[in-house]
Amino acid sequence: MSEGWFRRLRSSGVGFAFAIGLLTAGLFHLPYQSTAQQADTAVPAAARNLPPASSSLLGLSDAFASIAEHVKPSVVYIKSGRKADTARRNVRPRMQVPPGFEEFFRGVPPMQQEPRFQEGSGSGFIVSTDGYILTNNHVVDGSEQVTVRLLDRREFKAKIVGTDPNTDLAVLKIEAKNLVPAPLGKSSTSRVGEWVLAVGNPLGDNLTFTVTSGIISAKGRSLALPGQSERSIQDFIQTDAAINPGNSGGPLVSVRGQVIGVNSAIASQTGFYSGYGFAIPIDLARNVMDQIIAGGRVNRVAIGVSVQNATANDAEYVGLPDIRGVLVQDFGEDSPARKAGLEAGDIIVAIDGQPVEYVGQLQQQVAFRKAGEKVKVEVARKGGVRKTFEVRLQELSAPREVARGALGASDDSAGSANQATAEIDLLGLTVQPVDPQSARQLELTPEQRGLIVTGVTPGGPAHGEVLEPENGGPDILLSVEGKLVKGTTDLRQALKSYKPGDIVTLRLYNTRAKSHRIERIRLGE
């Protein structure tokens, strides 16, 4: 996926000069009524009555107009600015021409100088009568000056109350009277296919307070956005309502006139609308907003696991009737989940009895609780086993670098028969043991010295799941079904009791990402 595909709706200080020739009836002296309309001829009753389809369209049109009138007074236009030396330290100097050489540089455009003050724009919406405004973090990130303009053209200097880059949300505050807060709905009850309106300020000053319509195209989307981390919470609502740069922070509104999302990103190769817009669910945004308003920052807790969405093989492996849940890949330092009894390879299916379908849902069910609070985590294991563990939540601290252990000479103790390179057809992998030199080059601890994946059979069982050196790797295969594999003999022994079509659990370590993970592979012929 190209880097330009998923773009945040970055603040847009874009100016457009519209030259539109308007052809009006007055210009050509066209009549407002036709001859037939002016005639005194009686019109049949059937012609005067609209067909049912037209009546339905009129009702929908009136509904959209009413919603727009109801919501637009709550939407704001945000202008942000920062000094150039704050935005970028490396300013390109203006080209200096030595005296006497001016003739040689005629017609050469001068090098553009960085503006002293950089401006951008975006959207937001009022959430309280006392002046709190919700928007995107990237609309005001790094800004030294923020101005908010209302629909009635009043402008106010805004204070940034707090931001949360992990959800791309920010809260502003203005001192103003007669404000109209937007009614907040529930994104959890919204359904794919429902009509929605997007309100905002695309392309800067020229198209402020624009309303577009569409439907909810999908829910629970995650995006490869710039600056995201493993702590980013992504649970986007996808819509085909037209969204463009400058719409960031504006509301996505249901047909009930309630905000169900905060417009945040588009999928486009050009940077402009191409049918795919994404909004942060209001349920998530409300949790973040409430914490920022209460304390100026967001406090998060966690159960101490690294996770990814479960796959079809995962679901079959643990006996789930459908593909859902979250796969436990690894544990953080001092993980409360591991202490409680969870294991790598478990599928988390519920928190406190509430179903967990995907990663973003798990994060939201846990992240905004209090440190020390206990939750009941239900997991599915091999063969349909179900277990529930009580896990005490820990505060999510800043990431720490894990110290690498020293390599000892005693680590290289396997026999030569266990050290040969081998092609494992059941997995579609070519592997070789980690030797001391490779261990030093890849900075592996003794616990990470398994089998280096040197090749993956195209179209084979592990293709797309296990990584070779040329494709994001190499991965180190550490264990199969919980059995350590230090050499190829270990691997063959671990696979001895399995046949083609069986699903096995591989525990891997990726040398580039420096992270552990679980992959479930259906064995091939």
Image (cartoon, rainbow, N blue to C red):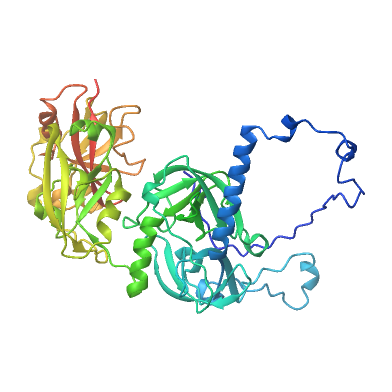
Q: Residue at x 89, y 40 (%)?
A: 38
Q: Is residue 193 visible?
A: yes
In-front residue for pair 511/172: 172
- Count of residue discs: 0
Residue 191, quarter of the rendered image? top left
Tell whether 47 sits left or right of 5.
Answer: right
Q: Position of residue 420 (x, y in %)?
A: 17, 33
In-front residue for pair 299/343: 299
Q: Is residue 484 visible?
A: no
Residue 405, quarter of the rendered image? bottom left
Residue 207, quarter of the rendered image? bottom right
Above or below, 454 relative to 499: below
In-front residue for pair 299/483: 299
In-front residue for pair 309/207: 207
Q: Position of residue 224 (x, y in %)?
A: 42, 50
Q: Residue furthest right?
A: 29
Above or below, 378 relative to 367: above
Q: Residue at x 73, y 35 (%)?
A: 48
Q: Position of residue 281 (x, y in %)?
A: 40, 53
Image quarter of the C terminus: top left
Q: Position of residue 67 (x, y in %)?
A: 55, 54
Above or below, 477 relative to 67: above
Q: Residue at x 50, y 61 (%)?
A: 249
